[in-house]
C-alpha cells in the first residue's frame, strides 16, 4: 500500500478565511456507553468538532449517542460492523461489514452523512480500498497515533500528539474498544487517559495556531 491509496493527512489544510492550519481529531471504536459521552462533553466544553469512526454493532445498540454526535456538529464515519481484520476477509465479507455499518449508522440517525471509512487496525488491502470506493466512502488512515488504546498514561498521550502535529494532521484517538476486547470490569475507566489528555491537548493545539476541524465534505 502506498500513501496515495488513502488519506494519512488532509491536503490544503488551511482555512480560507483565516489562513490558519487545521488538524483533525478522530475517534475509533465507539460509541461507548461511558467514555463517549465524556469525550463529547470535553469537545463541547472546548467547542471542538471531531470525526467518530464508529462500529456498526455499537451504533445499533446506542443510537442516542450517534444522534448526539450529529446534533453537536460532529461527523460520523464507518469503522465496519464488527471490527474484524479485513485483511483476513474476502471481498464479499468486506462489502457486508462496510455496508451493514453504514446502514446501522443511518438507522440510528437518518441525518448522518457517512462519507469516510477507516479499516480496523489500519489493515488496508486493495480489496478494502476497492469496496470502500464502490460504496462512495473515502479511505482515511491517520498521521498521529499516540497509542492511547494501550493506556500509556495521560502525559504520554499528550506528549505524543503535541510532538507530531503539523498542518493537515489526522489524529487517531479511541472512545471505545472492539467487541472482542470489551471487559465490563473496566468499562467506566476504559478511556480515562484519553479523556484527560484531550482536555489538555485542545488548548495547546489552539495556542499553536491550529484550527480543530472535523473531516471536510467528501466529494
Image (cartoon, rainbow, N blue to C red):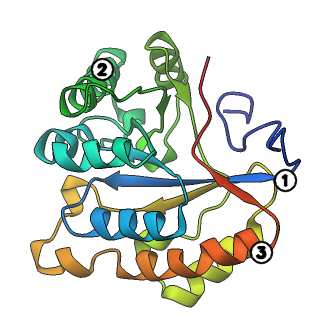
At 73% from the left and 36% from the top, the residue drawn is 3
Q: Could you say which is closer to the camera, residue 189 or residue 179?
A: 189
Quarter-of-image position of residue 85: top left
The numbered mark, 1 or 3, whose residue comes first in the sequence reads: 1
Q: Is 212 placed left or right of 62 in the picture?
A: right
x, y (%) of residue 191?
A: 35, 74
Q: Which mark is residue 128?
A: none
Circle 1 or circle 2, nearest the eye: 1
At 33% from the left and 18% from the top, the residue drawn is 95
Name the residue that disc number 1 marks: 20
Verify CB contact (< 8 Å) between mark 1 and mark 3. Answer: no
Q: Which mark is residue 207?
A: 3
Name the residue that disc number 2 marks: 99
Q: CA distance from mark 3 to mark 2?
A: 40 Å
At 85% from the left and 48% from the top, the residue drawn is 18
Q: SS for tag 2?
A: helix
Circle 3 or circle 2, nearest the eye: 3
Crowdedness near tag 3: few (<14), some (14–19) or many (≥20) residues, C-alpha within 10 Å:
few
Amino acid at each position: 500500500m502506498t500513501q496515495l491509496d488513502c488519506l494519512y493527512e488532509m491536503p490544503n489544510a488551511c482555512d480560507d478565511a483565516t489562513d490558519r492550519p487545521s488538524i483533525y481529531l478522530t475517534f475509533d471504536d465507539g460509541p461507548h456507553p461511558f467514555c463517549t459521552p465524556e469525550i463529547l462533553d470535553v469537545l463541547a466544553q472546548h467547542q471542538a468538532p471531531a470525526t467518530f469512526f464508529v462500529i456498526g454493532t455499537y451504533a445499533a445498540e446506542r443510537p442516542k449517542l450517534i444522534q448526539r454526535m450529529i446534533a453537536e456538529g460532529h461527523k460520523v464515519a464507518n469503522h465496519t460492523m464488527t471490527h474484524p481484520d479485513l485483511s483476513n476477509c474476502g471481498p464479499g465479507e468486506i462489502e457486508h461489514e462496510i455496508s451493514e455499518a453504514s446502514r446501522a449508522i443511518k438507522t440510528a440517525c437518518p441525518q448522518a452523512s457517512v462519507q469516510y471509512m477507516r479499516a480496523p487496525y489500519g489493515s488496508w488491502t486493495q480489496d478494502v480500498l476497492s469496496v470502500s470506493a464502490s460504496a462512495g466512502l473515502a479511505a482515511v488512515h491517520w498521521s498521529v497515533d499516540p497509542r492511547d488504546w494501550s493506556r500509556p498514561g495521560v502525559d504520554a498521550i499528550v506528549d505524543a500528539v503535541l510532538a507530531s502535529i503539523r498542518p493537515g494532521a489526522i489524529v487517531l484517538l479511541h472512545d471505545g474498544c472492539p467487541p472482542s476486547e470489551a471487559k465490563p470490569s473496566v468499562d467506566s475507566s476504559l478511556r480515562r487517559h484519553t479523556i484527560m489528555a484531550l482536555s489538555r491537548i485542545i488548548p495547546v493545539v489552539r495556542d499553536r495556531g491550529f484550527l480543530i476541524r472535523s473531516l471536510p465534505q467528501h466529494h
